DNA sequence: CTGAAAGCGCTTACAG
DNA sequence: CTGAAAGCGCTTACAG
């Protein structure tokens, strides 16, 4: 189980280890012929660089980190993350970069994990998800100077990369669609109010409702769990002027809403139209299937990794906008009930 | 942004770097007093070991790897993995060990990832999930000598750790429960036939059906997706002697079955009892809520990590058995219909 | 108990 | 184009 080292390759090739290093890394400093010879020997011996040695001298960890700050239970049932992660990895593994994952309960723990990773130089950069409007991780990332990319809207002075979609436009199109179907009492069950994108979407919702002259916008805030989604739905449906359509900030709450409506004897979509937040497999798993905002979460992850790797490489931070989510209409939405 | 090194600490403490290393690692070789002085200086300077340097000399990567060999879509909607991962990390982060994650499409790609990780010494060990009865990863792991723990039944010569639950007993108890409710036509919608635990459960199911004298056991195999779960359900319910109860190998298929039953006008649980495989949040998200086999997946992950870390530490591989999954009865099961 | 030194496996100026 | 050497930041025998 002895490792093959460049020393061994150098010996066999009759050159110095420096030459081997140059050859292996495709840098100038060796003739084409010796390069070819060295590569062949390395290949024959099954040589692989020692990550540790490489990191120590090259000062690069060849890994990036993703800290997920959520309780395990809400993570599990939320299909977003696995799709996002596999998008990240599509890009990372092509670049021989590892993905270090940590799941923690809150941002305080996330900050600690970030500090430790960076102090140990375990990662070259970070992916930040679930951004808060006031986010404790951002000042820390700035202080440390870690390359990082936001899975969310651009922020600050442009030192951080950002990959995002136009949530406001997506919400707009949802409201437009419902209004076109004749709905005038439209409510929104929002996600965690601390999240930046929750705020963006709520603001867009309010603006759209006012623009259409639908009266005072009704928004209920939740923590994204099915329990709160159900409670919010129950509250909305209990009022005499109950909404004829509700927009949910994720899929899990929309599914929960379906049950509440059924229990309360409110027909979907006959008396109530339901719109889900992301278009995960959950939406087609239930009846009626859920109309939802669709977007390519794998691509989202892939682009996020790409922007991060560029930064790690020393190129400037970019902001990349994904295609705006588009409504996929299914059975949970229909024309507003008469009257 | 200069790193604090043990050289700096040694200088300030007036000792050699060797002494600093001993002190920092809690090994003998320094007096209590100098140790305390060194620790204090390290703390004041905010010293953190360089992972790369440590790995290079200590020959340990301080990371373990998890390769998930599944298409991204089926991963996303399957709540198992995130819960398992957060269990792993509960243990790993306590031991300052990173979790490297890779998502690939099949076992061939998984084997490649494993070889590369090990050749680069990026990981100290591996967690293997979704074990096939014939698993291409096992001979490779044996060949390389990578410490690895199976999230599944023990195998081979005991060189690998294993953490598992008694699936057969769990299936037994499910069948017993249904028989006690008067069911005599019970079918099973199984997961991927190549998976070891699928085979175990199917065998247990057949045995239980025969033991109760319920005739020829009916089993339909699937790939775990909601689509195949729906198709299997449709096939089973289309027969004149349709089952009055069906056991599903995961939650997603059980949810899909609910829709099929509804579309076919088969009442759940009045005419059909539905049992789900794992007890994830999905089960309480639908109506009727799903009776399911409950077990603590986070604990499963935690124990898996623990066994692996022991092996990385040089201790012998262990096999650890989780508590047997227990049936959580909800609205989707009831007494068999009369007649 | 302590110090000086070699070594882990690479990368990278620096001379030839 | 090529070689010899220093250095990355630790750990660990090996002498004193």
Image (cartoon, coloured by chain):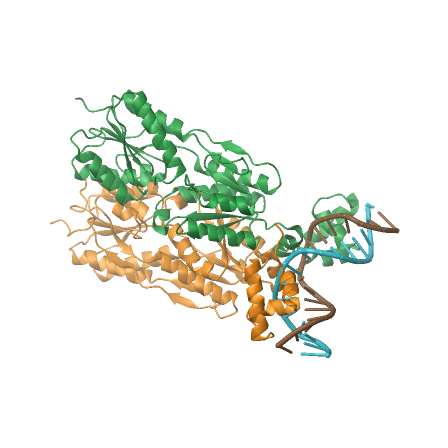
Chain colours: A orange, B green, C cyan, D brown
User: Which residue occupies the foreground of this view, B140 or A185?
Assistant: B140
Measured as percent of width and height from the top left, residue A114 is found at: 54, 54
Residue B98 vertical position relative to residue A9 in the rendered view, above or below: above
User: Which residue occupies the foreground of this view, A85 or A251?
Assistant: A85
Q: In this view, does B92 lie to the left or right of B187?
A: right
Residue B13 vertical position relative to residue B1 in the rendered view, above or below: above
Residue A164 vertical position relative to residue B328 in the rendered view, above or below: below
Q: In this view, does B62 lie to the left or right of B240?
A: right
Measured as percent of width and height from the top left, residue A273 is found at: 20, 49
Quadrant of residue A252 in the image? top left
Q: Is residue B111 visible?
A: yes
Measured as percent of width and height from the top left, residue B63 is found at: 56, 49
Residue A21 vertical position relative to residue A4 in the rendered view, above or below: below
Q: Is residue A268 left or right of residue A228?
A: left
Measured as percent of width and height from the top left, residue A177 is found at: 20, 58
Residue placed furthest toward the left: A338
Q: Is residue A121 visible?
A: no
User: Which residue occupies the foreground of this view, B102 or B108?
Assistant: B108
| Residue at the image position 70 percent from the left and 48 percent from the top | B24
Counting every numbered tag in the picture gives 0
User: Which residue occupies the foreground of this view, B75 or A292?
Assistant: B75
């Amino acid at each position: 189980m002895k490792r093959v080292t460049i020393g061994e390759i150098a010996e066999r090739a009759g050159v110095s280890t420096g030459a081997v290093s140059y050859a292996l890394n495709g840098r100038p400093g060796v003739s084409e012929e010796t390069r070819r010879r060295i590569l062949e020997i390395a290949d024959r011996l099954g040589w692989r660089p020692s990550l540790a040695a490489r990191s120590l001298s090259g000062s690069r960890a060849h890994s990036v980190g993703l800290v997920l700050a959520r309780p395990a239970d809400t993570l599990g049932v939320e299909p977003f993350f696995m799709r996002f992660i596999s998008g990240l990895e599509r890009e990372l593994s092509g670049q021989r970069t590892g993905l270090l994952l940590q799941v923690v309960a809150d941002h305080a723990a996330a900050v600690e994990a970030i500090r430790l990773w960076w102090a140990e130089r375990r990662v070259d950069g970070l992916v930040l998800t679930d951004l808060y409007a006031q986010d404790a991780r951002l000042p820390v990332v700035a202080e440390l100077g870690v390359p990082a990319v936001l899975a969310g809207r651009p922020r600050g002075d442009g030192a951080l990369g950002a990959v995002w979609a136009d949530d406001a436009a997506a919400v707009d199109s949802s409201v437009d669609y419902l209004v076109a179907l004749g709905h005038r009492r439209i409510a929104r069950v929002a996600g965690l109010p601390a999240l930046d994108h929750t705020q963006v979407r709520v603001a867009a919702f309010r603006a759209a409702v006012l623009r259409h002259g639908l009266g005072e916008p009704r928004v209920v805030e939740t923590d994204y769990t099915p329990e709160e989604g159900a409670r919010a739905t129950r509250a909305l449906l209990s009022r005499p002027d109950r909404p004829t359509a509700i927009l949910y900030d994720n899929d899990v709450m929309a599914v929960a809403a379906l049950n509440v409506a059924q229990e309360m004897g409110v027909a979907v979509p006959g008396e109530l139209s339901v719109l889900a937040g992301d278009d995960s497999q959950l939406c087609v798993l239930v009846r009626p299937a859920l109309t939802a905002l669709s977007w390519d979460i794998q691509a989202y992850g892939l682009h996020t990794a790409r922007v991060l790797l560029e930064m790690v490489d020393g190129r400037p931070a970019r902001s990349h906008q994904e295609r705006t989510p588009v409504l996929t209409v299914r059975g949970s939405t229909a024309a507003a009930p008469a009257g």
